[in-house]
Image (tube, helix red, strand yellow):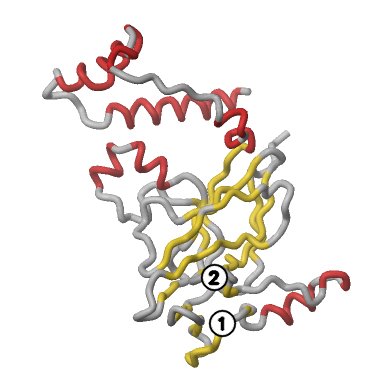
């Protein structure tokens, strides 16, 4: 019997790109050498899924108040709480009586200085025991003029709008969001991984004397031995990691 998907995305807004698997080449932005040989970078780039703005829009902040405009309406409007154009009506047509009038807002200015909330247009449900880390896309260039606060949502228990908090950093010109460029990456995390009992289980060994025979042997294999082979092939770590990943897939398929 096949397992249920790790995550199910409900893409509710019309238009815009649906969620898609994050790209190990960071949308082709990684240099060829990094893509071929740096498994650490490509694994990070491909870990999770991209979410895209549902519409092209701009945010302007004068240090006190927000304004916004979007591709369907060039005029600037004050931003308090804003619905995605036309969505509130669509929501009420489809929603049961008990949910009518409760469509999630697309944008909202918060009580925190310089901060807005933005809805991705998506609701997500994960397998039991799995959460979603919401963050800026890995490896891709950061959006100019703003930063995103990361958060972990227990999306197996909480079924609501998948949003993020954005801190606007400049007041001299608008911040732009494009619907063809991912603004958010969500990554699956087993809830046990960030449990305090797990994260408090660590030790710090100080000084060179803390390295024993097994650590020096591992260091020799990782650092010393390759550097004694001038003609060595590049990407040994990448090859080994990909072989382990392939072996893991085969083991799961056989099971």
Foreground pick, 36 / 118 = 118
The image shows residue 11, relative to residue 48, as above or below, that is below
Give how far across and how far down residue 193 sits, in percent: 58, 34
Which residue is at 66% across, 62% downward?
A: 161
Q: Which residue is mark 1?
A: 79
Foreground pick, 204 / 93 = 204
103 to the left or right of 55: right
Which residue is at 46% across, 63% downward?
A: 183
Give how far across and how far down residue 198 sits, in percent: 58, 28
Which residue is at 69% across, 36% downward?
A: 2
Question: What kind of element bears circle 1?
Answer: loop
Q: State the image quarter where residue 226 is shown.
A: top left
Q: Which residue is mark 2?
A: 116
Q: State the image quarter where residue 98 is shown.
A: bottom right
Q: Which disc is residue 226 wearing?
A: none
The image shows residue 75, relative to residue 93, as above or below, that is below
- Whether residues under marks 2 and 1 lie with C-beta atoms below 8 angstroms apart, the answer is yes
The image shows residue 94, relative to residue 164, as above or below, that is below
101 to the left or right of 33: right
Q: Residue furthest right?
A: 97
Foreground pick, 59 / 186 = 59
Asked if one can make out residue 58 in the rendered structure from this viewpoint, the answer is: no
Give how far across and how far down residue 113 sits, in percent: 51, 70
Image quarter hosting the C terminus: top right
Q: Residue furthest top?
A: 213
Which residue is at 35% across, 20% downward?
A: 206
Asked if one can make out residue 178 in the rendered structure from this viewpoint, the answer is: yes
The image shows residue 5, relative to residue 181, as above or below, that is above
Real-space Cα separation, disc 2 to disc 1, in angstroms: 9 Å
Image quarter hosting the N terminus: top right
């Amino acid at each position: 019997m096949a397992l249920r998907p790790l995550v199910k995305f409900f893409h509710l807004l019309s238009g815009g790109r649906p969620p898609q698997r994050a790209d190990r080449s960071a949308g082709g932005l990684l240099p060829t050498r990094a893509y071929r040989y740096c498994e650490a970078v490509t694994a990070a780039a491909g870990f999770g899924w991209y979410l895209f703005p549902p519409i092209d829009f701009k945010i302007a902040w004068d240090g006190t108040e927000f304004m916004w405009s979007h591709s369907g309406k060039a005029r600037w409007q004050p931003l308090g709480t804003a619905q995605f154009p036309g969505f509130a009506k669509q929501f009420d047509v489809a929603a049961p009586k008990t949910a009518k009038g409760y469509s999630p807002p697309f944008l909202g200015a918060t009580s925190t200085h310089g901060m807005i909330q933005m809805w991705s247009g998506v609701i997500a449900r994960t397998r039991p025991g799995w959460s979603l880390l919401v963050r800026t896309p890995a490896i891709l260039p950061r959006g100019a003029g703003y930063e995103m606060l990361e958060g972990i949502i227990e999306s197996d228990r909480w079924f609501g709008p998948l949003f993020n908090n954005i801190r606007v950093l400049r007041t001299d010109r608008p911040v732009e969001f494009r619907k063809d460029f991912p603004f958010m990456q969500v990554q699956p995390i087993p809830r046990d991984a960030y449990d305090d009992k797990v994260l408090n289980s660590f030790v710090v060994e100080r000084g060179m004397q803390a390295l024993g025979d097994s650590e020096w042997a591992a260091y020799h294999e990782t650092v010393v031995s390759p550097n004694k082979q001038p003609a060595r092939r590049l990407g040994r770590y990448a090859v080994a990691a990909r072989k382990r990943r392939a072996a893991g897939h085969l083991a799961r398929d056989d099971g």
